[in-house]
Amino acid sequence: MTRETTPAASAASAGPQEISGVFRGSADGAASLQEKVKRTEQGISARSIPTFIAGEELAYLADDDARVVVLTADLASAGRTIDFAKRHPDRFFNIGVAEQNMVSAAAGMASTGLRPFVSTFAAYVALLCCEQVRTDLAFTEMPVVLLAHHSGMALGYYGTSHHALEDLSVMRGIAGLTVVSAADANELRAILRASLTRDGPVYVRMGRGRDPEVYTEVPQGFAFGEAIRLAEGSDIALIATGSEVRPCLQAAEELAKESISARVVDMHTIAPIDAAEIRTAVDDIGTILTVEEHNITGGLGAAVAEVVAELGKPVHFRRAGVPDEHVVLGPPGALYAHYELDAVGVAGRAKDLLQQTRENNR
Amino acid sequence: MAVTHNIGPIPARGTQERKGLLPLLEEKAKFIRRETVRLSRIAGAGHYTGTFSCAELFSALYYSQLRFRPDEPGWEERDRFVLSKGHAAIGLYPVLADLGFYPAGLLDNYTRLHSLFGDHPDMRKVPGVDFSSGSLGHGLSVSLGMALAARVTGSEYLTYCLLGDGELAEGQVWSAAMAAGHFKTANLTAIIDRNQLSIDGNTETVMGVEPLDDKFAAFRWEVRRIDGHDYDQILDTFTYARDRSDVRPFCVIADTVKGRGVQRMELDKDWHVGNLMGADYDDVMAEIDVGLRPVRSRT
């Protein structure tokens, strides 16, 4: 569905070269925050960075909701839940480096009526704790929100052990689990607010920690499973999620200079997927490029492909993502460029697909 | 008006009240074993031995210790019980029915299509089950969460978790144990059904768990080791669990015998899952009715 939300006009180009949000040598992260703000690229305020607002937003929510508790696994600074801990120390639990214990303990808390938010690296909550998520949260319908930060290859040269390029695939295979990506801080705020009235567990995929602004304000009327159409277009539909929404908007601007009209859809919710929005893209445009910071196996592209294939209509379709490999080593920005997931890369992929479309239609 | 069970103190050892309680609990343990045998036949297979080993613990928990309201299963101040060794649910279901959480007749559909009752308990289907279980190693973490939640909400309920000894090989158990010690969850009691066997054989052969007392003590728990088939020891320990002032979580290591109460199954790993039929079924039912006899040594 279309929403009256203006993409930030002046966001700087993507391409951060540093890993963000993982601090060392600071007791409470405050010094690092200031340092971080200084290092933040021109035009992107720290407040637009999801990992920076999570704890603050949860603290606000907890002011009005006594059920909110927050757990982390020795990443209070990296996930910024430290900002929650300062305001609500009695409702904050640092479980130590024991993610599986954390997820199951959150399940026990939720069973008593609390609303736990669990924060740690996406790689660990989705992969290490997959079975706890399935058995203790989804099967039991526990309203636990998993804040999976530093998803994708946000941790760059930390390497595959710290990457989560399989999380959407794994998580969306679990019945009863809502799987959603935040494109930026404002969308994360909307997700966190909506999660308080959501039945069952929610997996919230948070990006690189310095995602340029997509939404200038918290998107009104946000609803799980209802994609947000950010730009209208008639030649190609770019369906993106999380950290790839911004590059798609930028790519659409670049494509417009070549008289290519691109629709941009923020498919924030991967499960349940917004089949109606996909069907509309097929009917209106017929050329679809999905874009995600994820292995092309099993993620957004696969979820969209499942819907597209069952429509039985002729469509030109490609998935942009990380190929089915463990990524090469490098800082995040270099990796996005290498895998053509920055604005330039997405625009190039879109033109390739349109070229194929024209050849097929000839 | 909802009736709260086990609200009063457990009668002290040696008193007439205690002496009157023991035969009732013994009958309940027989009931648990008989129902386990009966329901297993409905399913065609059942976890006999790991249920028999905790029959006394089940009966003591539900008929003298845990506070709950069968006509108000969601009562917020109820004590919580997490059956981390979920495969013993076949012994728990009859108890919950007996207490009035649901009609006993529902059990006749045990494990059949659309039954509420599977081999492992589902909190969304079975009233009185505080948390679903079956995947070993999760229960102590879940219980830890319940104990910490009581701290947040200011509730006074106690949380009990019954673990098997085989599942202690799961690392998550020790993450939970470490965290419980760290957070000083005095309102958490772990009961370990130390029945000596896991599926493939003796724990000390498959994966040694001893010295268990020292392990939990090192994780900052108060530890007591008792005979898990001796009601006086169980009840004394449960009384202490409710009254104690120690800030540490409480670990009860209940030394038990896997398969206790049916001699052909005692300490025999091959009865972890089985199916009694025909005369064997009748013989075992009769043996259970006699009550516990000395354990035969198995060398």
Image (tube, helix red, strand yellow):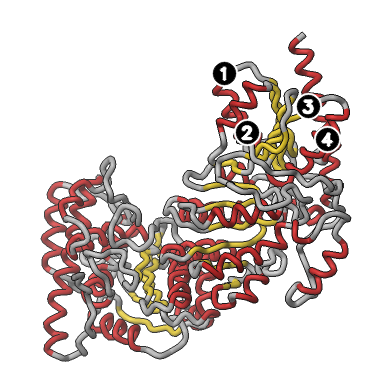
The residue where tag 3 is placed is: A261
**Earlier along the polypeptide chain: callout 1 or callout 4?**
4
Residue B23 percent coordinates (x, y): 13, 76
Task: Specify whether disc 3 shares its chain with disc 4.
Answer: yes
Residue B246 percent coordinates (x, y): 43, 89
**Earlier along the polypeptide chain: callout 3 or callout 4?**
4
Q: Quadrant of residue A327?
A: top right
* Image position of A246 with respect to B50: above or below: above
Say which chain tag 3 marks. Answer: A
Q: Nearer the viewer, mark 3 or mark 2?
A: 3
Q: Which residue is painted at 55% across and 80% down in the image?
A: B182
Q: Residues within 10 Å of mark 3 (few under 14, many from 20)?
A: some
Task: Specify whether disc 1 shares its chain with disc 3.
Answer: yes
**Earlier along the polypeptide chain: callout 2 or callout 1?**
2
Amino acid type, callout 2: Ala
Q: Quadrant of the C terminus of chain A?
A: top right
In-front residue for pair B67/B91: B67
Under circle 4, the secondary element is helix
Q: As drawn, is A5 to the left or to the right of A169?
A: right
The residue where tag 1 is placed is: A312
Spatial distance from mark 2 to mark 4, Cα to Cα?
26 Å
Spatial distance from mark 1 to mark 3, Cα to Cα?
25 Å
Say which chain tag 1 marks. Answer: A
Under circle 2, the secondary element is helix
The residue where tag 4 is placed is: A253
Residue A282 percent coordinates (x, y): 63, 23
Q: Which residue is painted at 63% across and 63% down in the image?
A: A57
Residue A302: mark:
2
